[in-house]
Amino acid sequence: MIDDMRVGALIAASSIKRGNKKTLAFIIFVLSLIFMNLVFLPSMIGGMTVLFTGIMQDYPFGDIVIEPSGDNTYINDADSVLQKTRAVEGVRAATKRLDVGASIEHKQKVVGVTITGMIPTEEYEISQYPYSIIEGDFLGDLSRDEIILGSIIAGTSTTLGDIYDDLGEARVGSLVDVTYSNGVKRTYKVKGIMEGNFELVDLNALVHYKEIEEVYGLEGSKATSVVVRVDQPGSEDQIKDKIRDAGVNEQIFTWADKSETLIRQALQSMGAINVMSEFVSLIVGAALILIIIYINILNRKKEIGILKAIGITPRSIVFSYAFLSLFYVCSGIVAGLILYFSLMIYFQANPVVFYETMIIRPVIDPVLLIRSIITMLILSVIAGTLPAWSVSKESILKAIWGR
Amino acid sequence: MIVVKDLKRYYGSGETAVKALNGVSFEIKKGEFVAIMGASGSGKTTLLRILALLDDATEGKYTIRGLQVSNLPEAERSYYRLTQVGYVFQDYALINEMSAAENVYVLSMMEGKSKKEAYMVALEALDKVGLKDKPDRVPDELSGGEKQRVAIARAIAKKPDIMFADEPCANLDTRNSQQVLEVFKELNDKYGQTIVMVTHEPWHVNYVDRVITLEDGKIISDEIMSERGENNI
């Protein structure tokens, strides 16, 4: 077996060393493109996932979000939940929120929104809401008649504004009328306009927690969610368990749980395209390697017969083609990696921009790279070996003289 | 050394079968240089291919040093071809992407020798055919005669019991043909190499000990040359 491999390696090495260099370069180039195709699109999708999950963490869900259990609309004793949660080691901050439906009217223009009632001072440690104000100021502890509007609602968004209805000329200082889902009407002065370049943020409006509590007549510190931030990123699952152990009986989700559910749908279509793209790439790659090796073998069928005639074993011949295709694919992978990392460097410096401000940088995923490399290698051995095995089984006379 | 008894090779079956060999029997002793001659289609190449274990006989027995080789399974035939038999093709049959030395030492590596040992064996074989100074040339950089001498070096490097040559001078001019035949003669004289060569050139008999002539798949004459080039029988 070892001798077969040594002889196979010698035959393959000679073929590479003295074969047609232009053909070799072309084969490697095409294989590098196939490899690129396998890894580039998933990297871009990975970048989108990072962007979306980042937004989910920074705005609605934090690192961990606690939501009402069962069919309950509210967490009934949110302060108790907050107390237990804050006492858990590894929790950096936690706050409660109340999300409700409402419509906002300004100069005969009406839009439907979700209004989040929050405790403004606590949000500085929890979310990016306070830092996403592009006009005016964020809410304060005394902001009882004031509202923060998302840029899409206000009509100032230059990126997503065309798709949604807006209030037209509502700016900082404008008065807007809010009709809550229970029919209660309130008038608020616009204190600030926020922009997160994401619908979930820019279609939202924020008021003080106590406003919602009052409008809905809620008692006993109710909340639709308790949002938690942790000290150490990556410890969310452990902290989640600790919160449960601390006696919190509501539903507890990490940002990953939530993102998976929410983003899954958004990325499902992209994922399907990605899977199709990977599948087609693999088929094209396998076919290409098969064709290359098969043409190579047809051209050298006589040579294979001669090798057999002088005593070289069929196994050596199969090894030689396995090594040859392995060399093609390894070179293709190396060239593909160079191309891939060059593109990664380029896109880190020049990220893809959606809606003018959503910046997507492709993510280098080592697992994806390793999986793609292994797939290509397996493919090369199969695609390179099968035709060689088939021809090496032919009779010597048929191989050499076509009989 | 070689004993062939009533060897037959038919292509096809029934009344339309082509009888390429139709009952051939002979013996070849160790150290003999034998030419198999005959007109085109007489069966000489078919006979050589069967002797070199490249093809199967339809009927008959064939032994090398007492071992019945005609019915060996392919794996053993392959091993036999590697270790006991050298074969020189009409069109050299060198691997174009391998140097002269690589063409020769690939077989030694197959036998388990290290690359260095195999290279030394190749140099020795190339020396015997007068090409010691061209081990790194690829076939495209060699003349027809030189290519054939590399092919001979490849055949003799493994020190086979017997060497077969299928019209080794067919693609060569007279001068190169003479050089190749001189190599054969020297291998036979100096090293006692048993050689069976198919040829259709009458002047080649000057170099051999014995001439077997075929016609329509049968031996029509088997002549010993007392002095090379002189017909004894």
Image (spheres, rainbow, N blue to C red):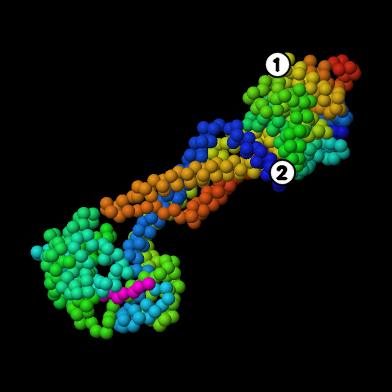
Give how far across and how far down residue A86 sits, in percent.
37, 77
Vertical relation: A331 (above or below) B218 = below
Q: Which of these two is toward me, A79 or A33?
A: A79
Q: Residue at x 33, y 50 (%)?
A: A352
Three-letter code, disc 1: Asp
Please give the label number shown on residue B197: none
Mark 1 nearby-residue class (10 Å; few <14, some 14–19, many ≥20): few
Q: Is A99 a magenta residue?
A: yes
Whether residue A403 is visible here, answered yes or no, is: no
Q: Which of these two is toward me, B110 or A337?
A: A337
Q: Which contiguous range is marked in magenta?
A: A92-100
Give how far across and how far down residue A24 sits, in percent.
53, 36
Nearer to us of marks 2 and 1 is 2
Q: Is A227 a magenta residue?
A: no
Q: Does residue A358 appear left or right of residue A185 in this picture?
A: right
Q: Main secondary structure of the magenta part?
A: strand
Three-letter code, disc 2: Asp
Q: Residue at x 45, y 50 (%)?
A: A39
> Which chain is indicated by disc 2?
A
Q: In terms of image quadrants, where is residue A196?
A: bottom left
Please give the label number shown on residue B173: 1
Q: Does residue A40 appear left or right of residue B217 in this picture?
A: left
Quarter holding the C terminus of chain A? top right
Vertical relation: B202 (above or below) A196 = above
Give how far across and how far down residue A160 sits, in percent.
23, 56
Vertical relation: B36 (above or below) A102 = above
